Image: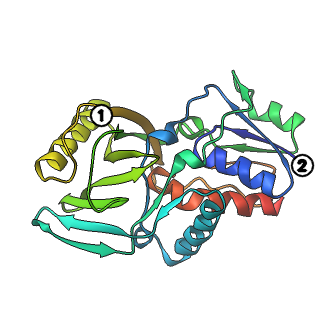
Amino acid sequence: MKIAIIGNGIAGSSAKRIAQEFGHEPTIISTDNASASKSALATIRPTWFTKAQQVNIERSWSWYLKWDATVSRNAVVSSWKDPSMIKEQDDWWLVQPLRVLEKPDIVGMVPYVDLLAKNYDAVLNASGVSVSSDLNRFWGATLVSKTAKADNMPFRIHHLRPYHSVHIVQTENAIRIGSSISKDKQKCYNEIYRMKEICEDSGLVSKVDDWELAMGVRTQTKDKKLIEPELGKKVTSIGGLHRTGYALAPDLIAQWIASL
């Protein structure tokens, strides 16, 4: 079966890999070689999800294992209340998205979905920001350093205040600081550098000068419901995943492909 995939973020890239595993012929089509997913820290925390979704997460994790993209299923955690008090928690999982991302097979203007449907047996729109006009868009930011040092790697969580934390991870021979997100791009930019200062002042990371910024857009439907691939439907979409994409996308896509 020939499957057209629009977009090469974590959803589109997962779709190509899974389609190949199922013996199909996937083609990724994108307007650009770049992928927003590469700017994200792929944190998965099962306690954020329903029990049914936690089953999805386990199956997604199995795909990441197959792709050699898993990093850790526990983190060292501390709080602003007392940064010196740290503990290990096994409900923070970490994936390395760079191990999953695929380059598009076709780069250029993406044809209309109905046109693609005439030339492919199935079409998955995984384009993220353009999958629907009824989406809220959020900026996410990550700082990356090749020379910074950090203790308690590969995964460190520090709660800055209630429901707001900074994530420090070590992957691909680099230290990454993330978890800055806002509808306002400038606010997101300011927040990630403030996070870096807090990490430096608290001794969570060393002070270096080679931090590089990566930013990308995450989307969420206005009613906060996910756009899931419709099982058995030859032309469908996935999107609006916001922070849940890494946890759910591989399994949702695998279910869709298996249903065709």
- Numbered mark located on residue 1 in the image: 2
Q: Name the image quarter holding residue 186.
A: top left
Q: Which of label 1 and label 2 is nearer to you?
A: 1
Mark 1 secondary-structure assignment: loop
Q: Residue at x 55, y 35 (%)?
A: 35
Q: Visible in this render: residue 233? A: no
Q: Name the image quarter holding residue 119.
A: top right
Amino acid identity at mark 2 = Met
Q: Position of residue 202 (x, y in %)?
A: 12, 53
Q: Earlier in the sequence, mark 1 or mark 2?
A: 2
Q: Position of residue 48 (x, y in %)?
A: 40, 68
The residue labelled by disc 1 is 211
Q: Residue at x 31, y 46 (%)?
A: 177
Dot 1 and dot 2 residues touching (CB under 8 Å): no
Q: Is residue 52 rendered to the left or right of residue 84?
A: right
Q: Visible in this render: residue 19? A: yes
Please tell me which residue lies in front, 249 or 158: 158
Q: Residue at x 15, y 52 (%)?
A: 203
